[in-house]
Amino acid sequence: MIKLKENNNFYVITGGPGVGKTTLLEELKSRNYEIVPEIARELIREQQKDNGKALPWENKNLYKEMMFDRSIISFEEIDKNTNKEKPIFFDRGFLDTICYAELIESEITERMKSYAENWRYNKSIFMLPPWQEIYETNNERKQDWKEALLTFEQMCKTYKSYGYDIAEIPKKPVSERADFVLEFIEKKQN
């Protein structure tokens, strides 16, 4: 059994691909907030460099397993080594891997479910909606627009199913998006 961990200062920023998550996180970092980079992007770059097979367009199940394991390790390291008072922003959370498993119709193991039920981020997660005007593909992001929409829908469904509340970030310039996030947190704390 996985022991309960609740981290009210751990905030997930998520959504489908290409919606400005990384740009928003960089803005928060420039304001002296700690951010945790996206595990999936790091994994894809590593696998491409090493001619590995754990890629969403090669071996989806291996990619899912490695992404989940690394997300858990990241959560645990941050949990052990950071100040519990100040907000920490995650570029996706390990529940994103459960969403991915749903999308590719892959098994969601009891272990994955147990972590999702017992290791908790802040109850409010930040979701960036699909935004076609800024959407683009690249070497790590190969999904088309239709897949981006489907991912967003599944992401909302996945987080809600584990008891999270979704705060949808408005389609605005990045500085206003960051203001929205920080003002939301401040209101919740008061």
Image (cartoon, rainbow, N blue to C red):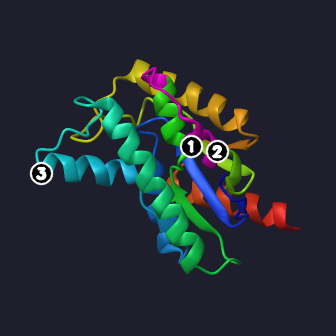
The answer to whether mark 1 and mark 3 are in CB contact below 8 A is no
Work out which quarter of the rendered image holds the C terminus and state it.
Answer: bottom right
Count of residue discs: 3
Residue ID for mark 3 = 50
Residue 80 position (above or below residue 187): below
| Spot occupied by residue 86 in the image (x, y as percentages of width and height) | 67, 76
Instruction: Tell me the kind of residue under disc 1.
Output: Arg
Q: Nearer the viewer, mark 1 or mark 3?
A: 1
Residue ID for mark 2 = 114
- The residue that appears at 11% across and 44% down in the rendered structure is 51
Q: Is residue 32 left or right of residue 58?
A: right
| Spot occupied by residue 150 in the image (x, y as percentages of width and height) | 50, 22
Q: CA distance from mark 1 to mark 3?
A: 28 Å
The answer to whether mark 1 and mark 2 are in CB contact below 8 A is yes
Q: Is residue 99 magenta?
A: no
- The residue that appears at 47% across and 63% down in the rendered structure is 74
Q: Is residue 114 magenta?
A: yes
Residue 118: tell me if it is visible: yes
Q: CA distance from mark 1 to mark 2?
A: 5 Å
| Spot occupied by residue 57 in the image (x, y as percentages of width and height) | 25, 29
Residue 121 position (above or below residue 9): above
Q: Secondary structure at mark 3?
A: loop
Q: Is residue 109 left or right of residue 184?
A: left
* 67 and 91: which is toward the camera: 67
Residue 51 position (above or below residue 158): below
Instruction: Tell me the kind of residue under disc 3.
Output: Asp
Instruction: Tell me the kind of residue under disc 2.
Output: Ser
Q: CA distance from mark 2 to mark 3?
A: 32 Å
Magenta stretch in the rendered image = 103-116
- The residue that appears at 48% across and 70% down in the rendered structure is 29
Q: Is residue 15 left or right of residue 3?
A: left
Residue ID for mark 1 = 111
